[in-house]
Amino acid sequence: MQGLLPRDERELRVDQAADRLSYLVLSFGLLGLVAWRSLVNDEAPWDLLALVVVAGAAGTAYRLAQRAVSGRWLLVALTTTGIALVVGAAIVLSLRG
């Protein structure tokens, strides 16, 4: 459904930038809550962490479905995922140790 007035490219770019900023604030806010729950409250925050991971996976799946993934983007995504897995494993091992 379109609005009453046609939208220009600048408006679309602003909307996309606002959505990106909102996603970053939401994701890092949830990660902060995950850290707080686990370190201060000594709770298992898997529900919030799963929400962050599922949101990232949904965005990635959409990009892949739209064939909007470059080789550089894929390299950065895989590198980031690998680093996150290594850091996560190191934290889990250090807490068990």
Image (tube, rainbow, N blue to C red):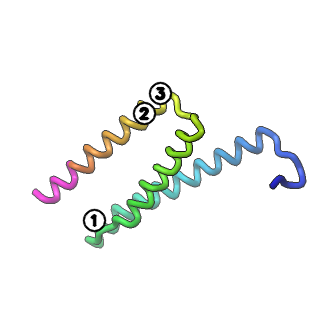
Per the rendered image, the range of residues in magenta is 90-97
First of labels 3, 1 by sequence position: 1
Secondary structure, mark 2, is: helix
Marks 3 and 1 close (CB-CB < 8 Å): no
Q: Picture coordinates of residue 33 (x, y %)?
A: 40, 64
Secondary structure, mark 3, is: helix
Where does label 2 land, which residue? 76
How far apart are the two marked residues, 3 and 1, measured between alpha carbons?
35 Å
Predominant secondary structure, magenta span: helix
Q: In the figure, residue 48 lies in which quadrant? A: bottom left
How far apart are the two marked residues, 3 and 2, measured between alpha carbons?
6 Å
The answer to if 80 sits in the magenta stretch is no
Asked if residue 38 lies left or right of residue 20, the reply is left
Asked if residue 91 lies left or right of residue 37, the reply is left
Q: For the residues carrying marks 1 and 2, which lies nearer the camera in this image? A: 2
Where does label 3 land, which residue? 72
Q: Residue at x 42, y 33 (%)?
A: 76
Identity, as a three-letter code, of the amino acid under mark 2: Val
Q: Residue at x 22, y 53 (%)?
A: 91
For the residue pair 51 and 25, the one nearer the viewer reads as: 51
Marks 3 and 2 close (CB-CB < 8 Å): yes
Give the number of the disc on residue 39.
1
For the residue pair 40 and 8, the one nearer the viewer reads as: 8
* Farthest-out residue, right: 4
Question: Around disc 2, counting alpha carbons within 10 Å, would you say few (fewer than 14), some (14 to 19), or many (20 or more)?
Answer: few
Asked if residue 22 lies left or right of residue 96, the reply is right
Question: Around disc 3, counting alpha carbons within 10 Å, would you say few (fewer than 14), some (14 to 19), or many (20 or more)?
Answer: few
How far apart are the two marked residues, 1 and 2, measured between alpha carbons?
29 Å
